[in-house]
Image (cartoon, rainbow, N blue to C red):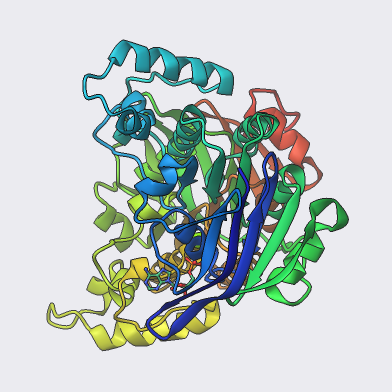
Amino acid sequence: MLVEMKHIYKSFANNHVLKDVSLRINEGEICALLGENGAGKSTLMNILGGIHQPDKGDIYLDGNKVVFDGPAHPINLGICFIHQELNLINDLPIYENIFLESEYKSGFRRVKHTYMIQETQKIFERMGVDLDPRTLVKNLDSSYKQIIEICRAVIMEASVIIMDEPTTSLTDSEIERVFAMMERLKEQNVGIIFISHKLKEVMEVCDRYTVLRDGKMVSEGQVADVTTKDLARYMVGYDVRTDKLVREREKGAEVLRAEQLTCEQKFRDISFSVYEGEVVGFTGLLGDGRSELFQTIFGADKITSGKLYLHDKEVKIRSTMDAIKHGIGYLPRNRKENAIIKDMDIVENSAIASWEKYARWGIIQHAVHKEKLSELQKTLKIRMGNYSNNITSLSGGNQQKVVLAKWLSTNPKVLVLDNPTQGVDVGAKEDIYDIILRLADEGIAVIILSSEATEILRLCNRTYVMYHGHLQGELTGEEMNEQTMMELATGGAASISVS
Ligand SMILES: Nc1ncnc2c1ncn2[C@@H]1O[C@H](COP(=O)(O)OP(=O)(O)OP(=O)(O)O)[C@@H](O)[C@H]1O
Ligand SMILES: [Mg+2]
């Protein structure tokens, strides 16, 4: 099916988000939709997904004009949308989620569970996904949820699939799997729109690209004719640096030390140290226990055994409040589920970790928080309307920046950042890296968990690699390269062992 969007305009109040944007999605082609945070990518796709009506402009399917009367309409016509903010029902098992729309489509209520489980199993085998289809979605890591959304689109036999940042929290090897699946869909003549801030991915999987800047189309062409550097420049309007940023420094005092931390089923015998002014990476593959380890350190889960020291003194962290009091900041993976409160406004979201710190006589100091946010808004270049707007009115990348602002306002001693630049555009990523390095200069111990190898390589002085819940190795200097990291993450041995 050929999809054409012609001369689309869309505004939210005074915010003119899309200004005369046209886009064409050919059969059997993967088209990248690129642009800075807030450029209008999701809005354009929300129009194609029947969620928003355009103010002006038309949509044509195989040359016939269509007006969508709601999100179910494009689905029935074969357009499947994998949203940036995931869209699964947590209380249902995986297989029911996968068949949600198809069930709706076939119109019968008596559902054949065994059939659905078998079909889900089949697609998991094809995708190399090691999950039981009967698992409840709420028990899954966010990265698996993205994989499940993709499986759902495949089962629905969609003709056009919109993927709005489907790989944000996936690691390189999972991304390869998703790409293999996209290639297969392409062979079956499916047209795919792929939104991503990871330009390396775009080069690898896309045929064509379209770049939006401030709601206008600024560039389009064949991916084969450009480099990632070109694409980054089209997006932000200037050359984006790509060099190594890590700074050599004298080892400061030890800030955080873990001794044989264990949490049954999740990780075991984890021992590591982080020093003042150091940026330390933690890397691995999906399901390696990294995120769980730091959730535990932050008091969100219980340690079964092991000890934790801050400045050489043993600490017992029983709750997240304890962690904040001890000066630990933790930016979790998966913003929508763990980091934002959807019913609160922007200032409130930026303030929840520091309310207590600034409260006077138990009263929240709204003005202080607003001022803090306004400072950080400049540093982080957060694009927003009013401070009192709901957090969900911000684009994905700008929400991420507000979450980062929240932790910066707590003045932490240790900052644990799980995928700090998830969904952040190429230009803003560099701003966040500068902030991380500045914090390290100020003596803060920074720990970065990242699914992007290049992020770790550019920023970190040292990195620990995890594999199936234990530390597989520690890398520094020359040893810290993509290949060695990958070898360790897949269970290989390193020449440097964990000290
Ligand atoms: N429902 C809404 N109400 C008000 N404003 C909105 C709404 N949805 C989007 N916007 C605004 O439209 C603009 C474009 O947002 P959009 O989500 O399309 O950006 P994006 O290109 O997808 O960015 P990102 O890369 O961060 O996901 C932003 O300024 C955003 O605040
Ligand atoms: Mg978006």
Residue sitting at 41 percent across and 40 percent down? Answer: 76
Q: Is residue 225 above or below residue 118?
A: below
Query: Tag count in the figure?
Result: 0
Q: Residue furthest right?
A: 225
The percent coordinates of residue 342 (x first, y second) are: 28, 62
Query: Is residue 134 visible from the viewing direction of this image?
Result: yes
Image quadrant where residue 139 sits:
top left
If the image is split into quadrants, where does the N terminus sit? top right
The percent coordinates of residue 203 (x first, y second) are: 76, 49
**Of residues 495 and 499, the one drawn nearer to the viewer in this rendering:** 495
Q: Is residue 125 left or right of residue 119?
A: right
Q: Is residue 385 above or below residue 263?
A: below
If the image is split into quadrants, where does the C terminus sit? top right
The percent coordinates of residue 409 (x first, y second) are: 39, 74
Q: Is residue 253 left or right of residue 242?
A: left
**Of residues 35 and 99, the one drawn nearer to the viewer in this rendering:** 99
Residue sitting at 61 percent across and 64 percent down? Answer: 425
Query: Is residue 243 visible from the viewing direction of this image?
Result: no
Residue sitting at 83 percent across and 57 percent down? Answer: 227
Q: Is residue 244 above or below residue 213?
A: above
The percent coordinates of residue 200 (x first, y second) are: 73, 50
Image quadrant where residue 148 sits:
top left
**Of residues 161 and 238, the one drawn nearer to the viewer in this rendering:** 161
Image quadrant where residue 358 sits:
bottom left
Q: Is residue 55 left or right of residue 135?
A: right
